Image (cartoon, rainbow, N blue to C red):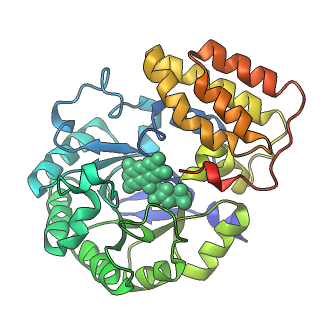
Amino acid sequence: MTNNYLNSPLSVGNKTVEKRLVLAPMTQLGHIAFRELVSTFGGYGLLFTEMCSAKRIPNENREISPYFKWRDEELSRLVCQIAGPAPEIMANAARRIEAEGFFGVDINFGCSVASICNQNWGAALLKNPELAAGIVAEVRKAVSIPVFVKFRTGWKDDPCPAVDLAKRFEDAGADALTFHPRVAPDRRSRPPRWEYIRMVSESVSIPVFGNGNVFCYNDCQDMLQQTGCDGVAIGRMAIARPWLFAEWTGSLAPGPDIYLDTAIRMTELLLKHYNPERAIRRFRKFAPYFSANFRFGHTLCSQLMNAKNMKSVRNVLYDFFEKAPDLASKPNMNFFI
Ligand SMILES: Cc1cc2nc3c(=O)[nH]c(=O)nc-3n(C[C@H](O)[C@H](O)[C@H](O)COP(=O)(O)O)c2cc1C
């Protein structure tokens, strides 16, 4: 049932998304190399980029930028996420994103790290619903590609402001919402309140992607059933198992080799897209999530984090996989930052 549902198309604005599982935007994790890795497995409807600064996008050079960087082949299913403080800045960024041929643009009202909120970007804007809706309206006016909004519960544990915001975003012209039902200062320490996803979904007629703590197929099924959301955005678990979109939509039955093969492929793709220094730094962001899959993941993780270059990373991986490692019955969430 879920499998069929996940494979059913969804209209978002003037376009169609072929599958209802999407990769959530993640800074330092959802980069071009990781997305190429995910695309080798398939099974997703959309991929979201890392958050990009709206101020920089109009003049950003995709050959140099580590964030505003893509493969042309992925554009038809790629949404660029932007963050910024003011309607006109966001609209200018959206114009470039449309001109480059992205599927859509996603407005970040979810990031609650201090460096972003202090500049009045991200979740800080949830404190100012009029300005947040004004940003959505200005971006809507600027482009005809689908406009997504990603947001959180807000700054206190009360679903009413989130429901109000959802309606404002819809009225301002958003085509789809991704809702992560956590309060903004909570960096994933408490479970998200999925019941709020239902309230948000029921309050708007545009599609809502539910997000937060979906770690296995059953979680995905539960989220869809409990919340009535139209699709599911997967974050951290997709880093641990980049093939999960294909697995959960039924096109792949992963064999035991998939772990080593995927990690090695990750090293290759990082070196394809980045210089060796940035490649290794980005591998270190991936390593804890990947290590969470194994019973002795701590050892693997610390060895991967200490490796000085990709050659050493590969040696660590080959050593670890020499004797088939024990998989954890479910990934060890202590690794998930
Ligand atoms: C390392 C990291 C970076 C993230 N960066 C972003 C971001 O740039 N933009 C955004 O909207 N959300 C960001 N998020 C939040 C995720 O998109 C998602 O909402 C969150 O991880 C909950 O989903 P999950 O339980 O499936 O991981 C980030 C999360 C993590 C762990």
Q: Residue 57 location in percent, x, y?
A: 21, 37
* Left or right: 271 in relation to 322: left
Where on the image, by quarter, is ligand 1?
bottom left
- Residue that extends furthest to the right in the rendered view of this protein: 323
Image quadrant where one finds the N terminus: bottom right
Q: Residue 111 location in percent, x, y?
A: 34, 57
Residue 257 in view here = yes
* Left or right: 33 in relation to 54: right
What residue is shown at x 67% (from left), y 49% (from top)? 244
| Frontmost residue, 75 versus 120 | 120
| Frontmost residue, 49 versus 156 | 156
What residue is shown at x 77% (from left), y 35% (from top)? 258
Task: Note whether 205 is above or below 71 in the view shown.
Answer: below
Task: Note whether 251 is above or below 7 in the view shown.
Answer: above
* Left or right: 128 in relation to 82: left
- Residue that extends furthest to the left in the rendered view of this protein: 88
What residue is shown at x 60% (from left), y 73% (from top)? 223
Q: Residue 238 location in percent, x, y?
A: 60, 48
What residue is shown at x 61% (from left), y 20% (from top)? 307
In which quadrant of the rendered view does residue 203 lie?
bottom left
Q: Give the mark count.
A: 0
Residue 21 in view here = no
In which quadrant of the rendered view does residue 68 lie?
top left
* Left or right: 245 in relation to 152: right
Task: Note whether 6 is above or below 279 in the view shown.
Answer: below
